[in-house]
Image (cartoon, grey):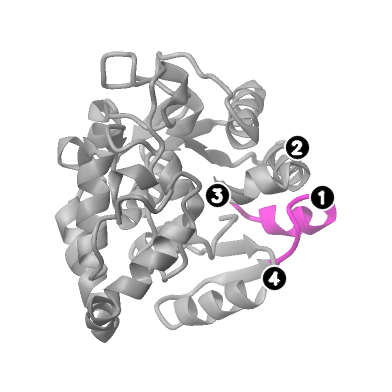
Amino acid sequence: MTGAFGNIGESSLLALFSKGYDIRCFDLFTKNNEKKQKQLSRRGKFETVWGDIQEKIYLEPIFEGVDCVIHLAGIIPPLSEQKPTLARGVNLEGTRNMLEVAEGQEQVPKFIFAGSVSAFGPTMHLQPPRTINDPLIATDTYTETKIECEKLVRASSLPWTILRFAAAPPMNVGTNIDPILFEIPLDQRIEFVHSRDVGLACANAVEADTVGKTLLIGGGKSGQMLQREFLSKFMEAMGMEMPPDSAFKIATKPEEYFYTDWLDTEESQRLLKFQTRTFDQYLEEMKSMMGMKRHIAKLFKGQAMKRILDASPYYSGVDH
C-alpha cells in the first residue's frame, strides 16, 4: 500500500489488520509519517519501506511477493495547486512508475487505484446522483492528474480497480483553517463518507470481484447534504460557531460551484459492503477526540472566529 500513513492510508491499514494479510507499506519518509508509522505499529503488524514514488529505484523492492497493490499516494489540494509540478510528479509520474514496475512482475498484482469524485468537475447544474457513466472534466491540477492516472490504469495490462472517493475528512482535523473551506458555496451538494469506511472499501476490494470496475465510494443517503448543514454541524462539534454567509463564495454560474456532489453508490456498496458509519457518528467521535479542547474553543470562540474569518478571501468584516 502506497501513501500508507496518510488519512485514507491509516484507515485502510486498520481495516487490513483484521484480514490476516502480510502487509507492506510504502511512503515518503517525513517526521509526521514516521510518527504515524510508530503509532500504527502498535495496532498491527506490517513492513515499512520508505522512498519516493517518483523514483523507480525505490519501487522495485516493494513488489516482491505482492498479490495486490492499494495505490493511495498522491498530492491533494491545496498543495496540488500551490505546487503543480510536484503534484504531476507524484500523482501522474508516480502512478506511471507504479504501473510499469507492476507490469514487469512475473505474477502481476491486482491494482487498486485511489481516484476522486472531484474528477466529475462542477455538476450542480445536473440532476444528482453522479454515476460512473458521467463525463470527467479537469478543472485544476489535481483533477487533471487524477483523470490522466485513470487512463493509465485502464490502459495497463494489470487486473485493475478504480475507487473514486467522496469527501472523507480525517479523524483528527486539527486547528488550522484551510482557505479552501470558503471556496465551497453553502448551497453546494456534498457527500460525506467516513474515512474508516473508505479504508474498509479499500481493504475489501483486495478480494472482492471488482476487476475492471470503477466504483464510487461515498457515505450513501445518510451522507448526502448541503455544505451549510455539513459545515454547521462540523463547527458545532469543534465547539465553534458557524461563520457568516459572507465569508463564503457565492456561485452564480454552474462552473463557479465546487467539484462535489451526491453519488450513486449502490454497486460499490453491494460489492464492498463498506458503509458502516454515519456523519453523526463521525461528529461524536470528533467531540470525543477533542476532549477539553472543545470546551476551550467555546471559551475563546471570539478569537477563534476572528482567526477563521482572517482565512476567508471573501469576508469583508461588515456583518460580524
In the image: residue 177, left or right of residue 228:
right
**Label 4 sits on what residue type?**
Phe
Label whose residue precedes the other's in the sequence (4 or 1):
4
- Do the numbered discs 2 and 1 sit on residues whose CB atoms are within 8 Å? yes
Residue type at numbered disc 2:
Glu
The residue stretch that appears in magenta: 50-66
**Which labelled disc corresponds to residue 72?**
3
Image quadrant in which the C terminus is located: bottom left
Q: Which residue is mark 2?
A: 100
Q: Secondary structure at mark 4?
A: loop
Secondary structure beneath dot 3 equals loop
Near-viewer residue (96 or 6)? 6
Label 4, on which residue?
29
Three-letter residue code for mark 1: Lys
**In this rendering, the label closer to the viewer, 3 or 2:** 3
Q: Earlier in the sequence, mark 3 or mark 4?
A: 4
Q: Residue at point 41% right, 58% down? A: 309
Q: Residues within 10 Å of mark 1 (few under 14, many from 20)?
A: some
Viewer-side label of 4, 1: 4
> Which label is found at residue 56?
1
